[in-house]
Image (cartoon, grey):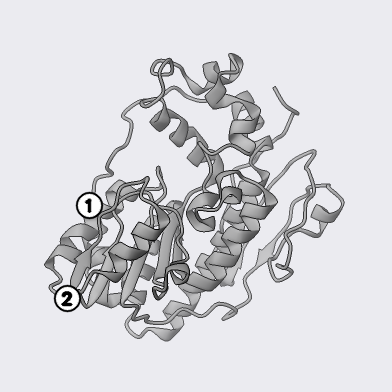
Amino acid sequence: MGKNIHLSKVSLVAAGLIVTIIFVCTSYIPFVIESHENILLPSSRKTGVCNNFQVSIKQESVSMEIRKPQTLFYSRIMKTGSNTFLSIVKPLINANKRCAMIKLPMDVPEADVAGNYSSTKAELVFGPEDHVPFVNFTRFGVEMPEYFSFIRDPLDHVVSAYYHQTKFFEGYMNTSLDMCLEQAKPLCSEGSFSQGDAFNVFKYFCGYGNDCHRKSLVSLNKAIQNVDRYYGVVGIVEDYMETLKVLELAYPDYFTGLYKAGKGKRKQNVRQSKPETTERSLQYLHLHLSLDYEFYFFIKRRFYEHLYSIKKHVSGFGGSSF
């Protein structure tokens, strides 16, 4: 089931503003991200040989200060703590008389998303509550919102997303991920993980275009470009409370009290028990998540740059409220 790939757990050390990512493998498929020479990637990627490498944060290369967007768009990705986040943030938004929350279904057309936002007359607009891909509002004559989101380590995300999706596909309810892979069921086909829509995080950052419904270099590039241009905070589930802290400091009009409200909050929509996934299955999955890890490392580096920047620029960081 795939090549023998040995994956060590990704380790992040933020001491001295250095992020060290250790990723051990014996073979890797090389590829190039177009127009993003500024993204710190291992030089070995050019030869297709993956060795240990270190990514160093360039201090202040990405600035994050207090932001005042009139419209804030939540790119909500399934199995990234989104139910927990909404359970924390909705009471804050509902208590904020200046702010209105947008509710949209998942399959709403792109033009209707822009229309709903433009027709809302509140001083501040937050949403949507559901899983809606990136929208280029300017195509419909509407000013762009500021976007924010969370992402998760791709391997952990795929395992969690698989068990979430078994609730909606007939014939999977009692099928472990290992069994699904062994039986080569459609949801666990090779293309499903590497290029399919079921486990595609890129579409939430890429948009509604046909190219965004499949994981590819095209959708990866578009996702990165959109994050660069339109996204403020993109946090990581592995550092959830620090993400809440950065969100509160970056968007005080929306999220004042977010960190305190999140402390000790019980996780929502968590499967109580699921079979342990074998190392063999994890190695196979990792082989097909190379594009996902490119995006994850890009977001991770960017987040810690934001964390450093907001600590420097916002007075009172680390004070009594945190």
Q: Which residue is mark 1?
A: 87
Q: Which residue is mark 2?
A: 98
Taking 219 as reference, is 101 above or below it?
Answer: below
Secondary structure at badge 2 equals loop
Where in the figure is residue 7, as x and y percent of width and height? 66, 38
Where in the figure is residue 270, as x and y percent of width and height? 32, 36
Taking 171 as reference, is 249 above or below it?
Answer: below
Where in the figure is residue 264, as x and y percent of width and height? 24, 52
Dot 1, crowdedness within 10 Å: few (<14), some or many (≥20)? some
Tell me the number on the disc at residue 27: none
Residue located farthest toward the right when viewing the structure as drawn: 47
Q: Quadrant of residue 310?
A: bottom left
Mark nearest the camera among 1 and 2 is 2
Can residue 121 be seen at all in this image of the molecule?
yes
Residue at 34% of width from left, 69% of height from top? 72
Residue 138 shown left or right of residue 92 in the figure: right
Of marks 1 and 2, which one's residue comes earlier in the chain? 1
Number of numbered callouts drawn = 2
Q: Quadrant of the C terminus?
A: bottom left
Residue 305 shown left or right of residue 293 in the figure: left
Taking 157 as reference, is 3 above or below it?
Answer: above
Secondary structure at badge 1 equals helix
Q: Which of the pair 176/19 is nearer the observer?
A: 176
Q: Which of the pair 273/71 is nearer the observer?
A: 71
